[in-house]
Image (cartoon, rainbow, N blue to C red):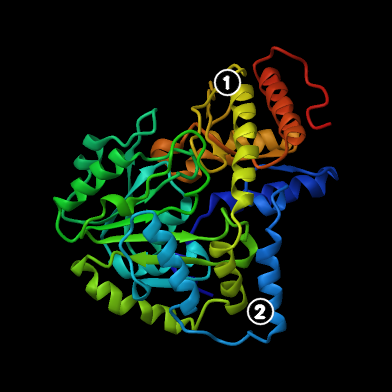
Amino acid sequence: MKVSERTAGVEYAIRDIITHAREYEKKNGKNVIYLNIGDPVQYDFPTPDHIKNALIKAVQNNENYYTASEGLPELRQAIVEKEKGKGFDVTENDVLVTNGVSEALDMTLASVVSPGDEILMPGPHYPPYASYAKFYGGKPVEFKIHPDGKPDVDDLKSKINSKTSAICLISPNNPTGEVFSLNDLKNIVDIAAQNDDMYIICDEIYDKIVFDDNFSGIGRVSKDLPVILLNGFSKVYLMTGWRCGYMCINSRSSKLDDFRINVPKLARVRIAANLPVQKAAVQALRGPQDHITEMVHKLRRRRDYIIKRLNSIPGVSSTLPKGAFYVFPKIDLAGRWKNDLEFVIDLLNKTGVLTVHGSGFGSTFGSDHFRIVYLANEDLLEQAMDRLETFLAVATNKQTPSNLNA
């Protein structure tokens, strides 16, 4: 039977690569070291007790019914408090709670992309931005980021034309861990302001997972521009499997009036987000925040370790991530592998270490890279780095193969 071209063309490298890991485990009877999915709860970052207890209490109190399609009012108000604290001008009526940030992104791009539109996004970028853009008939266009993490303003300007519908920003970035400074955000917003009818979509899901500098939210430079902010609870509040996110619409922008009226229709069609989880999300925002400091401390230590190891391996180089929990090293393929996908599959099959090919995050700037999630504890990261180092030494004929996946 026929499947639509838009569905057949959907790709998600982070999870698509798992099919190769399953084949490896079935064939070899050995466990894979999974460093491909950014799920802290699967490692040693458990959901805080006060958040879990709020979910349990909601279920036991029989709060298991449909709530408002736009989201639980109490949660929407708590979100307003959080985002206003970061400088974003938003009211409860400008907040829409979704089943994860992915649904917020889907609803947003469904509403702003028409066939033939071009959507600007940083290169490299989180794959669903490109997938959703293409799904709705648009074309993703990557703009360059300098090695120091700053956006290439000239490259960005050169790629804006009459077909450009939106600029998408992800800070801290997945897959690179780059964090845009306030000045970086201002420069991008100023460019967008010079072009009428251009949406600015900013994903701040990792806003509290930063290591070396203070985080700057886009709200501080939004003014009255058509800014749509995406955020959620999966990463900072360790609620990945619960799927709770949201979008916030800049209350000062009259250009977003039609968006503000029409996007809630999509929320109504899918009825509502999970009510018990929304009750827990209120406690996530208003309850103790101690776990965040501990999480960032552990991640900083793991980041520093993995960067030191990667940059000591010949043929591999990586910049220092400033946020999130990803590193995006460049690999010298040197004719040994046709592309980064072949490299990642070969690394898996010979070592049992699963990463993600960089071209899955955009071929223009992601090729010849691979992404590693450094959420695992130091012992597991050490095993993975030892295997990677030996694998590359063998590939360059500097060592005879032995115990690559011991």
Q: Quadrant of residue 223?
A: bottom left
Q: Residue at x 48, y 81 (%)?
A: 270
As drawn, the residue found furthest toward the top would be 398
Mark 1, secondary structure of its residue = loop
How crowded pointer 2 is (Cα within 10 Å; few <14, some 14-19, many 20+) is rated as some
* Left or right: 26 as drawn, with respect to 124: right
Q: Quadrant of the N terminus?
A: bottom right
Q: Nearer the viewer, mark 2 or mark 1?
A: 2
Q: Position of residue 202 (x, y in %)?
A: 36, 54
Res 38 seen here: no
Q: Quadrant of residue 303?
A: top right
Mark 2, secondary structure of its residue = helix
Which of the numbered marks, if any, corresponds to residue 311? 1
Q: Is residue 116 depicted above or below 146 in this figure?
A: below
Res 319 seen here: yes
Q: How many marks?
A: 2
Q: Residue at x 65, y 65 (%)?
A: 51
Disc 2 designates what residue? 58
Q: Is residue 30 depicted above or below 265 in this figure?
A: above
Q: Closest to the observer: 201 or 225?
A: 225
Q: Position of residue 159 (x, y in %)?
A: 23, 44
* Left or right: 259 as drawn, with respect to 401: left
Q: Quadrant of residue 63?
A: bottom right
* Left or right: 331 as drawn, with respect to 354: left
How crowded pointer 1 is (Cα within 10 Å; few <14, some 14-19, many 20+) is rated as some
Q: Is residue 366 depicted above or below 97 in this figure?
A: above
Q: Amino acid at mark 2?
A: Ala
Q: Closest to the observer: 193 or 11?
A: 193
Q: Position of residue 336 (x, y in %)?
A: 59, 24
Q: Residue at x 84, y 31 (%)?
A: 406
Q: Earlier in the sequence, mark 2 or mark 1?
A: 2
